[in-house]
Amino acid sequence: MATAALPVEQTTTGFLWCDLTRKCQLECAHCYNKSGPKGAHGTMSREDWIGVLDQAATVGVTDVQFIGGEPTMHPDFAELVDHALTVGLRVEVYSNLVHVPVRCWGLFQRAGVSLATSYYSDKASEHNEVTRRSSHARTRANIVKAIGLGVPIRVGIVGDNEQIIAATRADLASIGVSRIGIDRIREFGRACGGQKPDASNLCGGCGDGRAAIDPSGTVAPCVFSTWMGVGNVHDASLSSILSGPALSEAVDSLREVWGWGKDKGGGQKRPCDPDCVPKNPCDPRCEPNAACFPGTPPSTCRPKN
Protein backbone atom coordinates (compact mmCIF):
# COMPACT_ATOMS: atom_id res chain seq x y z
CA MET A 1 0.00 0.00 0.00
CA ALA A 2 1.47 3.36 -1.04
CA THR A 3 2.22 5.91 1.65
CA ALA A 4 0.49 9.25 1.22
CA ALA A 5 2.87 12.09 0.43
CA LEU A 6 3.43 14.57 3.21
CA PRO A 7 1.87 17.98 2.59
CA VAL A 8 4.26 20.65 1.32
CA GLU A 9 4.52 23.57 3.69
CA GLN A 10 3.61 26.91 2.14
CA THR A 11 5.99 29.79 2.74
CA THR A 12 5.74 33.56 2.68
CA THR A 13 8.43 33.70 -0.02
CA GLY A 14 6.96 34.93 -3.27
CA PHE A 15 10.14 35.88 -5.12
CA LEU A 16 13.24 33.76 -5.66
CA TRP A 17 16.58 34.73 -7.17
CA CYS A 18 18.10 31.79 -9.05
CA ASP A 19 21.74 32.84 -9.07
CA LEU A 20 22.90 30.40 -11.74
CA THR A 21 26.57 31.11 -12.30
CA ARG A 22 29.65 33.15 -11.50
CA LYS A 23 30.68 33.14 -15.17
CA CYS A 24 30.34 36.46 -17.00
CA GLN A 25 31.91 38.16 -20.02
CA LEU A 26 32.41 41.29 -17.91
CA GLU A 27 34.35 41.98 -14.74
CA CYS A 28 32.46 44.95 -13.31
CA ALA A 29 34.29 46.93 -10.67
CA HIS A 30 31.34 46.79 -8.26
CA CYS A 31 30.11 43.22 -8.95
CA TYR A 32 28.40 42.02 -5.78
CA ASN A 33 29.62 38.42 -6.19
CA LYS A 34 32.94 38.83 -8.08
CA SER A 35 31.72 37.19 -11.28
CA GLY A 36 33.92 37.24 -14.37
CA PRO A 37 35.33 35.30 -17.33
CA LYS A 38 36.99 32.77 -15.01
CA GLY A 39 33.82 32.13 -13.00
CA ALA A 40 32.20 28.70 -12.72
CA HIS A 41 28.67 27.31 -12.72
CA GLY A 42 28.97 25.80 -9.24
CA THR A 43 27.70 22.50 -7.91
CA MET A 44 24.04 22.87 -8.87
CA SER A 45 23.23 20.47 -11.70
CA ARG A 46 20.42 20.80 -14.23
CA GLU A 47 18.38 18.36 -12.16
CA ASP A 48 19.05 20.36 -8.98
CA TRP A 49 17.75 23.58 -10.55
CA ILE A 50 14.73 21.81 -12.02
CA GLY A 51 13.97 20.47 -8.55
CA VAL A 52 14.26 23.94 -7.06
CA LEU A 53 11.80 25.34 -9.61
CA ASP A 54 9.36 22.48 -9.03
CA GLN A 55 9.48 23.04 -5.29
CA ALA A 56 9.23 26.81 -5.64
CA ALA A 57 6.02 26.50 -7.64
CA THR A 58 4.42 24.36 -4.93
CA VAL A 59 5.33 26.44 -1.86
CA GLY A 60 3.97 29.83 -2.89
CA VAL A 61 6.74 31.35 -5.03
CA THR A 62 5.23 33.21 -7.99
CA ASP A 63 8.25 34.98 -9.51
CA VAL A 64 11.84 33.98 -10.18
CA GLN A 65 14.74 35.97 -11.47
CA PHE A 66 17.61 34.25 -13.28
CA ILE A 67 20.78 36.16 -12.50
CA GLY A 68 24.51 35.56 -12.11
CA GLY A 69 27.12 36.24 -13.35
CA GLU A 70 25.58 36.21 -16.78
CA PRO A 71 22.71 33.70 -16.62
CA THR A 72 22.53 33.15 -20.39
CA MET A 73 26.03 31.63 -20.20
CA HIS A 74 24.75 28.72 -18.11
CA PRO A 75 24.45 25.62 -20.33
CA ASP A 76 20.92 24.86 -19.08
CA PHE A 77 19.64 28.43 -19.07
CA ALA A 78 17.03 28.09 -21.85
CA GLU A 79 15.68 24.84 -20.44
CA LEU A 80 15.42 26.31 -16.95
CA VAL A 81 13.48 29.34 -18.17
CA ASP A 82 11.16 27.04 -20.14
CA HIS A 83 10.64 24.84 -17.11
CA ALA A 84 9.91 27.79 -14.84
CA LEU A 85 7.21 28.96 -17.25
CA THR A 86 5.82 25.44 -17.54
CA VAL A 87 5.29 25.16 -13.78
CA GLY A 88 3.55 28.53 -13.71
CA LEU A 89 6.27 30.90 -12.54
CA ARG A 90 6.82 34.38 -13.93
CA VAL A 91 10.41 34.93 -15.04
CA GLU A 92 12.74 37.89 -15.17
CA VAL A 93 16.20 37.48 -16.71
CA TYR A 94 18.85 39.86 -15.40
CA SER A 95 21.40 39.95 -18.21
CA ASN A 96 24.25 42.28 -19.12
CA LEU A 97 22.94 42.03 -22.73
CA VAL A 98 26.49 42.02 -24.07
CA HIS A 99 25.87 38.88 -26.11
CA VAL A 100 22.41 37.38 -26.49
CA PRO A 101 22.38 33.93 -28.11
CA VAL A 102 19.97 33.85 -31.05
CA ARG A 103 17.81 31.18 -29.41
CA CYS A 104 17.26 33.45 -26.41
CA TRP A 105 15.36 36.13 -28.30
CA GLY A 106 12.46 33.79 -28.92
CA LEU A 107 12.55 32.79 -25.28
CA PHE A 108 12.45 36.43 -24.14
CA GLN A 109 9.33 37.04 -26.25
CA ARG A 110 7.32 34.36 -24.47
CA ALA A 111 4.46 35.39 -22.22
CA GLY A 112 5.58 35.65 -18.62
CA VAL A 113 9.19 36.61 -19.39
CA SER A 114 10.81 40.02 -18.93
CA LEU A 115 14.35 41.38 -19.06
CA ALA A 116 16.44 43.56 -16.78
CA THR A 117 19.90 44.99 -17.31
CA SER A 118 22.35 47.54 -15.93
CA TYR A 119 23.50 50.62 -17.82
CA TYR A 120 26.15 52.87 -16.35
CA SER A 121 26.45 55.87 -18.65
CA ASP A 122 25.34 57.33 -21.95
CA LYS A 123 29.05 57.66 -22.72
CA ALA A 124 30.78 54.47 -23.87
CA SER A 125 34.03 55.32 -22.09
CA GLU A 126 32.32 55.72 -18.71
CA HIS A 127 30.19 52.60 -19.10
CA ASN A 128 33.18 50.53 -20.24
CA GLU A 129 35.27 51.77 -17.33
CA VAL A 130 32.76 50.08 -15.00
CA THR A 131 32.44 46.82 -16.94
CA ARG A 132 36.16 46.65 -17.77
CA ARG A 133 35.25 45.56 -21.28
CA SER A 134 34.15 47.31 -24.47
CA SER A 135 30.51 46.50 -23.77
CA HIS A 136 28.51 49.74 -24.09
CA ALA A 137 27.57 49.54 -27.77
CA ARG A 138 26.42 45.94 -27.58
CA THR A 139 24.36 46.40 -24.42
CA ARG A 140 22.69 49.51 -25.81
CA ALA A 141 21.97 47.82 -29.15
CA ASN A 142 20.37 44.86 -27.41
CA ILE A 143 18.23 47.13 -25.26
CA VAL A 144 17.00 48.70 -28.49
CA LYS A 145 16.40 45.24 -29.99
CA ALA A 146 14.43 44.07 -26.95
CA ILE A 147 12.18 47.12 -27.16
CA GLY A 148 11.70 46.58 -30.89
CA LEU A 149 10.64 42.97 -30.27
CA GLY A 150 8.20 44.01 -27.58
CA VAL A 151 10.13 42.34 -24.75
CA PRO A 152 9.33 43.98 -21.39
CA ILE A 153 12.57 45.46 -20.07
CA ARG A 154 13.68 47.58 -17.16
CA VAL A 155 17.10 49.17 -16.83
CA GLY A 156 19.00 50.00 -13.67
CA ILE A 157 21.49 52.84 -13.42
CA VAL A 158 24.05 52.23 -10.68
CA GLY A 159 26.15 55.14 -9.46
CA ASP A 160 26.19 58.37 -7.47
CA ASN A 161 27.12 61.08 -10.00
CA GLU A 162 23.92 63.06 -10.54
CA GLN A 163 25.03 64.50 -13.88
CA ILE A 164 25.91 61.07 -15.27
CA ILE A 165 22.64 59.64 -13.94
CA ALA A 166 20.58 62.42 -15.55
CA ALA A 167 22.33 62.06 -18.92
CA THR A 168 22.05 58.27 -18.78
CA ARG A 169 18.36 58.41 -17.93
CA ALA A 170 17.78 60.78 -20.87
CA ASP A 171 19.67 58.45 -23.21
CA LEU A 172 17.58 55.47 -22.11
CA ALA A 173 14.36 57.42 -22.50
CA SER A 174 15.41 58.46 -26.00
CA ILE A 175 15.57 54.82 -27.12
CA GLY A 176 12.22 53.95 -25.58
CA VAL A 177 13.04 52.64 -22.09
CA SER A 178 10.23 53.60 -19.73
CA ARG A 179 11.14 51.55 -16.66
CA ILE A 180 14.33 53.06 -15.26
CA GLY A 181 15.60 52.66 -11.70
CA ILE A 182 18.61 54.00 -9.85
CA ASP A 183 20.64 52.62 -7.00
CA ARG A 184 23.94 53.43 -5.37
CA ILE A 185 26.78 50.91 -5.39
CA ARG A 186 26.24 48.30 -2.70
CA GLU A 187 29.62 47.42 -1.20
CA PHE A 188 29.64 43.65 -1.50
CA GLY A 189 31.78 41.25 -3.48
CA ARG A 190 34.31 43.08 -5.64
CA ALA A 191 32.93 46.43 -4.51
CA CYS A 192 33.85 45.94 -0.85
CA GLY A 193 37.59 45.79 -1.53
CA GLY A 194 38.14 42.66 0.54
CA GLN A 195 36.46 44.07 3.62
CA LYS A 196 33.98 42.08 5.71
CA PRO A 197 30.38 42.49 4.44
CA ASP A 198 28.48 45.26 6.20
CA ALA A 199 24.75 44.58 6.56
CA SER A 200 24.01 48.29 6.78
CA ASN A 201 24.73 48.45 3.02
CA LEU A 202 21.67 46.31 2.31
CA CYS A 203 18.44 47.98 1.22
CA GLY A 204 16.27 46.59 4.02
CA GLY A 205 14.24 44.00 2.16
CA CYS A 206 16.34 40.85 2.58
CA GLY A 207 14.23 37.81 3.35
CA ASP A 208 11.05 39.89 3.30
CA GLY A 209 9.04 37.74 0.91
CA ARG A 210 12.15 36.81 -1.04
CA ALA A 211 15.22 34.60 -0.96
CA ALA A 212 18.17 33.65 -3.16
CA ILE A 213 19.87 30.40 -4.15
CA ASP A 214 23.48 30.59 -5.33
CA PRO A 215 25.44 28.23 -7.63
CA SER A 216 26.44 26.05 -4.67
CA GLY A 217 22.81 25.56 -3.58
CA THR A 218 23.11 27.84 -0.58
CA VAL A 219 19.95 29.76 0.30
CA ALA A 220 20.31 33.31 1.64
CA PRO A 221 17.95 36.22 2.37
CA CYS A 222 18.96 37.92 -0.91
CA VAL A 223 21.69 37.93 -3.55
CA PHE A 224 23.63 40.60 -1.66
CA SER A 225 23.58 38.76 1.68
CA THR A 226 24.97 35.41 0.54
CA TRP A 227 27.42 35.31 3.46
CA MET A 228 24.35 34.65 5.63
CA GLY A 229 23.56 31.16 4.31
CA VAL A 230 20.49 29.66 5.98
CA GLY A 231 20.56 26.20 4.42
CA ASN A 232 21.47 24.32 1.27
CA VAL A 233 19.09 22.64 -1.16
CA HIS A 234 21.57 19.76 -1.53
CA ASP A 235 20.82 18.88 2.09
CA ALA A 236 17.21 19.93 2.71
CA SER A 237 14.03 20.76 0.82
CA LEU A 238 13.47 24.32 -0.32
CA SER A 239 10.23 24.58 1.66
CA SER A 240 11.90 23.50 4.91
CA ILE A 241 14.63 26.11 4.43
CA LEU A 242 12.28 28.96 3.49
CA SER A 243 9.98 28.21 6.41
CA GLY A 244 12.75 27.25 8.84
CA PRO A 245 14.15 29.08 11.85
CA ALA A 246 17.53 29.90 10.29
CA LEU A 247 16.01 32.26 7.71
CA SER A 248 13.80 33.90 10.34
CA GLU A 249 16.77 34.39 12.64
CA ALA A 250 18.88 35.85 9.84
CA VAL A 251 16.14 38.31 8.91
CA ASP A 252 15.65 39.31 12.55
CA SER A 253 19.37 39.96 12.95
CA LEU A 254 19.38 42.13 9.82
CA ARG A 255 16.35 44.07 11.00
CA GLU A 256 18.22 44.95 14.18
CA VAL A 257 20.96 46.45 12.01
CA TRP A 258 18.39 48.41 9.96
CA GLY A 259 16.55 49.62 13.05
CA TRP A 260 13.07 48.35 12.23
CA GLY A 261 10.45 49.82 14.51
CA LYS A 262 6.97 48.63 15.51
CA ASP A 263 3.75 49.42 13.71
CA LYS A 264 0.41 50.13 15.41
CA GLY A 265 -0.42 46.44 15.54
CA GLY A 266 2.83 45.57 17.29
CA GLY A 267 4.44 44.10 14.19
CA GLN A 268 7.74 45.14 12.68
CA LYS A 269 7.71 48.26 10.54
CA ARG A 270 10.27 48.63 7.77
CA PRO A 271 12.09 51.98 7.61
CA CYS A 272 12.64 53.53 4.20
CA ASP A 273 16.13 53.30 2.77
CA PRO A 274 16.90 56.85 1.61
CA ASP A 275 19.32 55.46 -0.98
CA CYS A 276 16.69 53.28 -2.62
CA VAL A 277 15.28 54.81 -5.79
CA PRO A 278 12.44 55.40 -6.61
CA LYS A 279 12.12 57.28 -3.36
CA ASN A 280 9.04 55.59 -1.89
CA PRO A 281 10.11 51.95 -1.35
CA CYS A 282 7.90 51.66 1.73
CA ASP A 283 4.57 52.27 0.00
CA PRO A 284 2.37 49.74 1.86
CA ARG A 285 0.42 48.97 -1.30
CA CYS A 286 3.48 47.30 -2.83
CA GLU A 287 4.49 43.96 -1.43
CA PRO A 288 6.43 41.80 -1.01
CA ASN A 289 9.12 42.79 -3.49
CA ALA A 290 9.54 46.55 -3.12
CA ALA A 291 13.30 46.25 -3.24
CA CYS A 292 16.38 47.86 -4.70
CA PHE A 293 18.42 46.45 -7.53
CA PRO A 294 19.58 43.95 -8.77
CA GLY A 295 15.92 43.50 -9.31
CA THR A 296 12.39 42.42 -8.75
CA PRO A 297 9.60 41.20 -11.01
CA PRO A 298 7.61 43.47 -13.31
CA SER A 299 4.89 45.53 -11.66
CA THR A 300 2.81 48.62 -12.17
CA CYS A 301 3.90 49.65 -8.68
CA ARG A 302 6.74 52.16 -8.75
CA PRO A 303 8.94 50.70 -5.99
CA LYS A 304 9.32 47.59 -8.12
CA ASN A 305 10.33 49.52 -11.20
Image: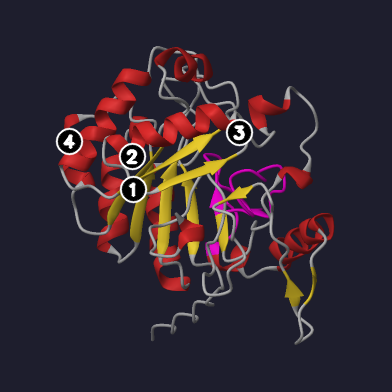
- What percent of the width, then of the height, locates residue 104? 22, 38
Residue at position x 77%, y 56% from top?
A: 254
Whether label 4 touches label 1, CB < 8 Å? no
Q: Main secondary structure of the magenta part?
A: loop
Q: Disc 2 marks which residue?
A: 173
Identified by mark 2, the residue type is Ala
- What percent of the width, then of the height, locates residue 54? 38, 62
Report helix, strand or loop for mark 1: loop
Identified by mark 4, the residue type is Arg
User: Looking at the image, how many numbered discs can be counted on the residues?
Assistant: 4
Q: Looking at the picture, tell me which residue is in the foreground, 207 or 203.
A: 203
As measured in the structure, the alpha-carbon distance from the residue carrying label 4 to the one carrying label 1 is 26 Å
Relative height, residue 130 to residue 104 (above, below): above
Whether label 1 touches label 2, CB < 8 Å? yes
Left or right: 119 as drawn, with respect to 262: left
The boundaries of the magenta stretch are 212-238
- What percent of the width, then of the height, locates residue 202? 69, 47
Relative height, residue 221 to residue 101 (above, below): below
As measured in the structure, the alpha-carbon distance from the residue carrying label 4 to the one carrying label 2 is 27 Å
The dot on residue 32 is: 3
As measured in the structure, the alpha-carbon distance from the residue carrying label 1 to the one carrying label 2 is 6 Å
Whether label 4 touches label 2, CB < 8 Å? no
> Is tag 1's residue or tag 2's residue first in the polypeptide sequence?
2
Identified by mark 3, the residue type is Tyr
As measured in the structure, the alpha-carbon distance from the residue carrying label 3 to the one carrying label 4 is 28 Å
Q: Is residue 66 covered in magenta?
A: no
The dot on residue 178 is: 1
> Is tag 1's residue or tag 3's residue first in the polypeptide sequence?
3
Q: Nearer the viewer, mark 2 or mark 3?
A: 2
> Is tag 4's residue or tag 1's residue first in the polypeptide sequence?
4
The dot on residue 103 is: 4
Q: Nearer the viewer, mark 4 or mark 2?
A: 2
